[in-house]
Amino acid sequence: MTSNYLCTFGGVVVVLDLNADGMLDRMEKGTESLRLYQRLYREVLSRGLKEKRVVKKDGMYIVVV
């Protein structure tokens, strides 16, 4: 996903994955539907896994630093 694609939202988006399980639980701030953000989040997690920047352990996604 390119930064240009993300910039089309034109503002700050705050969504929460409270269990780190890949499912967004709620939206604090944003102009689009939670369904759209969930799709984007899934793509980001997938890319992170492929690039070894995210790992999944015990059903939780963990960002690797």
Image (cartoon, helix red, strand yellow):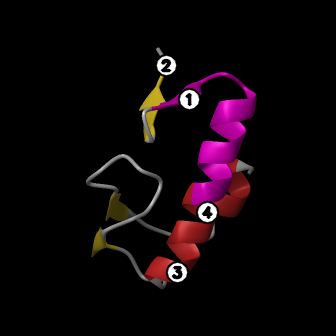
Return the mark for residue 54.
1
- Which of the two labelled residues, at mark 4 and mark 1, occupies the earlier sequence position? 4
| Residue that extends furthest to the top in the rendered view of this protein | 65
For the residues labelled 2 and 1, say whether their Cβ atoms are less than 8 Å apart.
yes
Q: Which residue was labeled with disc 2?
A: 64
For the residues labelled 3 and 1, say whether their Cβ atoms are less than 8 Å apart.
no
- Give the magenta part as a residue range: 42-57
Q: Quadrant of residue 60?
A: top left
Using the image, determine if residue 3 lies above or below residue 55. Answer: below
Using the image, determine if residue 52 lies above or below residue 56. Answer: above
Q: How many marks?
A: 4
- Amino acid type for the residue under numbered disc 2: Val
- Amino acid type for the residue under numbered disc 1: Val
Real-space Cα distance between discs 2 and 1?
5 Å
Relative to the observer, which residue lies in front, 60 or 17?
A: 60
Using the image, determine if residue 41 lies above or below residue 34. Answer: above
Q: Quadrant of residue 27?
A: bottom left
Q: Is residue 11 visible?
A: yes
Using the image, determine if residue 47 lies above or below residue 6. Answer: above
Return the mark for residue 43.
none
